[in-house]
Structure formats: structure tokens, C-alpha cells
Image (spheres, rainbow, N blue to C red):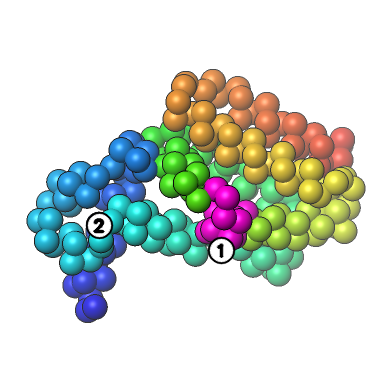
Amino acid sequence: MGKKGDFTKRYIKERAMKLFARKGFKNVTMQDICEATELSRGGLYLHYKSTGQIFSEIIDDLMNAQGDEFSEKIERGLSAKEILLQVLKRYKDEMMDAKGSLSVAIYEFFSADAAKQDNALCRQYQKSYLMWKRLLEYGISRKEFNAVDIDAIFDLIVFSYQGVRMYSELMTIDGRTPDRIISLIKTILLPNEEV
């Protein structure tokens, strides 16, 4: 497919992602995407055969873009505390952004495939685990972080973040909720004199 086709696919995914964030996965139809993109049904089907194919590409794009956000900063020798505080600030902002979250759509899309342990969501979880493990080990080795159970801290960070993202789509979340979570993570990780 040429440049025009690539541009059209990016445009379709951009518009579809907004629909999935607003309506979830199950409630978005190819007709909805046609209307959002102003493409004819034939024009849309030229690029994609189903909402699942579009959503799968959106997830792959997001996961590829995320990459390992800590490695480059660690290689540059940045402070583990600085890296942590940057990501926790971003997580807080994202926890409060119900309109931009794909959490419900991701749940709906992957729940049909929940028994399969090698889906993109499982691979992303493993990738996130390795990324966080490296940061936590880096911070502990530099004595910027307390010696902690890395698996338990990873679970706390990832599942509290994702849980708030999911609930923020279903109900209003008070801004104090992310603040309390982030404060607890800082209390556990950072030596007392730095909290």
C-alpha cells in the first residue's frame, strides 16, 4: 500500500480510537467508523475487514510506541527518583482522563480471549514488568529506593493505575484517589528523608 493508503489507515485508526475510548469495543460498529471517517463502506473495507482488526492494530501501535520508557533514561544516568516522579505524574494525569482511556475497550476486546495467555495484553504486561523491574533494581542499587519486593511494587503500581483508569470510565473519581496511590508508592519506595 502506498503513502496515501498508509495515511488513510492512520486516519481510520485515529478516528476509531476516539470511538473506542468513548463507547468501548463492543459498541463500535464498522458503520460508526465509516461515519467518523466519512469513508464509504467500500473505502473502509479496502483497508480493514472488521472492528477487531482495527482495534488490534491500534493496540499494537500503542504498545510499540510505549517501548521501554526507562532504559534510555537509565543509560543516561538520570536519577531513579527523577524517572519515578516523572512517570507517576503522567500516571496521575492519565488516571484522571476518563475520556482518553481505552481501558473498557481493552477489557472487552481481550476478555473474549482471556483464556489464551499469549495475547498482546499478556505480552505488554510482561514488557511492563521487565521495564519496571529494571528501574526498581536501578533505584535500589543506587540507594535511591528502599529495598522492596519488586513483584509486589510492580503489582501495586500497574493494577492500581489500570484499576483507576477502568473505574474512571464508569464513575467520577475524586482527584484524591490518584494522590493517595502515588503518595503510598512514594512512601514505600523513597527513603523517609525524601518523601
Q: Nearer the viewer, residue 99 or 151?
A: 151
Dot 1 alpha-carbon crowd within 10 angstroms: few under 14, some 14 to 19, many 20 or more = few
Snapshot quadrant of residue 123: bottom right
Q: Is residue 116 above or below residue 156?
A: below
First in sequence, mark 2 or 1: give its number. 2
Q: Is residue 83 above or below residue 191?
A: below
Residue at point 81%, 49% (across, down): 150
Residue 147 locus on image (x, y percent): 89, 48
In magenta, the rendered stretch is: 114-125
Residue 31 in sight: yes
Dot 2 alpha-carbon crowd within 10 angstroms: few under 14, some 14 to 19, many 20 or more = many
Residue at point 68%, 31% (across, down): 181
Snapshot quadrant of residue 69: bottom right
Residue 102 in sight: no
Q: Secondary structure at mark 2?
A: helix
Left or right: 28 as drawn, with respect to 149: left
Q: Secondary structure at mark 1?
A: loop
Q: Is residue 96 a member of the stretch shown in magenta?
A: no
Residue at point 68%, 26% (across, down): 180
The residue that label 1 is drawn on is 67
Residue 136 locus on image (x, y percent): 78, 53
Residue 1 locus on image (x, y percent): 24, 78
The residue that label 2 is drawn on is 12
Image quarter where the C terminus lies is: top right
Q: Amino acid at mark 1?
A: Gly
The numbered dot on residue 119 is: none
Q: Nearer the viewer, mark 2 or mark 1?
A: 2
